[in-house]
Amino acid sequence: MERTEVYPYQRVSDSGLGKRVRHRQISNPLPRLSFQKGREQLTALFNTVRPAVIPMNLMLSLVGFILARAFVLGELLPFVFAFVVALGRRDPGRTILLTGSASLGMMTITGGLQLVTNLFTLLSLVIIIQVVKIPADRQWWGYPLITSAFLIVCKGLFSVIQGPSFYQGMVVTFEALISGVLVFVFNIAGEAVQIRKSIADFQFEDVTAFLIVAVGIAMGLNDIGIMGLNAGSVFCRVSILLAAYLWGSGAATMVGVMAGLIPSLASSIFTQFLGMYALSGLLAGLFGSLGRVGIIVGFLLGNLALAMFVPETRTNVLGIWETAIA
């Protein structure tokens, strides 16, 4: 018969066991955070942006910043979305630069939920444009269609969150349709920029596309003033003088009419600048045969001819100074 050995034992208190368990848990090292993946992503982003930092892209970024401030009728912001889609989809590095500059431009003129809506819409639209690949023969209508549809969906959802409104729905739809048309127009300007077409080789569609870009720039500069001088007005005068010098009285008159409509498009208030810019452009083109001095004299004559119909002396004096700066 086997003898069973009995070994005495002593119960360990729960408090002692708990101390050892806690000591073991504390003594175990925490998992080390790895920043390798984040560092690789930042390096890839830097390598994408660095080749795009060239004078042409920096100039386009400045234009994008200004177009992000260009409101139509005080509520619509169609220029910036179309510009980023048309000019940025060809180059990822340029897309990042344009998106950043456009976002900064939005921050200078909007705030609150409107700013959040515009930033979210812009970033989402950029991602979609980079992901979706459209065949070359369908890009001329594919990108405008995607832009319009996405703006309606995205901004429409934000509009519903704020509170359903028929008027707000019409504003969103109108903004989306204008953006789609502008994508088509800016595609032409983007192709000219891509191949660096000279001004002498511009066709009618090229002139029209860059004229619309100039209208957006003037609208973006319209509320920037220094010592009473309006940056948008100076830009309009420079554009009219340049058109008179390059293409004559017809083009200068057309540019003058467009420049005169800018204050009305930006604020829905009709002003006297329409007639003044149109007449100034016409006279500048007619005096173009006398050279640069003749263009300047003709433009000043147009300003002075209509100054008698403007009762505000301060406005007339500021207009002369803006012409002198141009």
Image: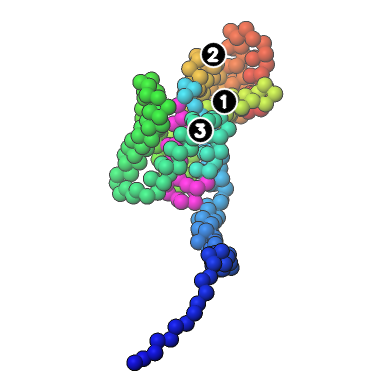
Q: Label 1, label 3: how many angstroms apart (C-alpha)?
A: 20 Å
Q: Which residues are magenta?
A: 76-97
For the residues bearing labels 2 and 3, Cβ distance under 8 angstroms: no
89 or 148, nearer to the observer:
148
Between 302 and 219, the one lying in front of the other is 219
Q: What residue would you read off at disc 3? A: 115
Query: Does residue 219 sit above or below 196 in this rendering?
Result: above
Reading the image, the residue beneath label 2 is: 272
Question: Where residue 222 is drawn, which disc sits there?
Answer: 1
Label 2: how many residues lie within 10 Å, few (<14), some (14-19) or many (20+)? some
The percent position of residue 205, horizontal first and vertical second, equals 40, 35
Amino acid found under the numbered disc labelled 2: Gln
Query: Is residue 191 shown in magenta?
Result: no
Label 1 residue SS: loop
Tell me which numbered mark, 1 or 3, is placed earlier along the sequence. Answer: 3
x and y percentages locating residue 6 in the rendered image? 44, 83
Marks 2 and 1 sit apart, C-alpha to C-alpha, by 15 Å
Residue 322 relative to residue 74: left or right = right
> Which residue occupies the extreme bottom position in the image?
1
User: Residue type at mark 1?
Assistant: Asn
Residue drawn 50% across the image and 61% down it: 37
The answer to whether residue 269 of the structure is visible from this angle is yes
Task: Give, as a three-letter code, the residue at label 3.
Answer: Leu
Residue located 36% across and 27% down the image: 173
- Identified at 41% across, 46% down, the residue is 127
Question: Between residues 234 and 90, which one lies in front from this camera angle?
Answer: 90
Magenta: predominant secondary structure element? Answer: helix
Name which of mark 2 and mark 1 comes first in the sequence. Answer: 1
What SS does tag 2 mark?
loop
Q: In the picture, residue 164 is in which quadrant?
A: top left
Please identify, in this view, whether the residue under mark 2 or under mark 3 is nearer the observer: 3
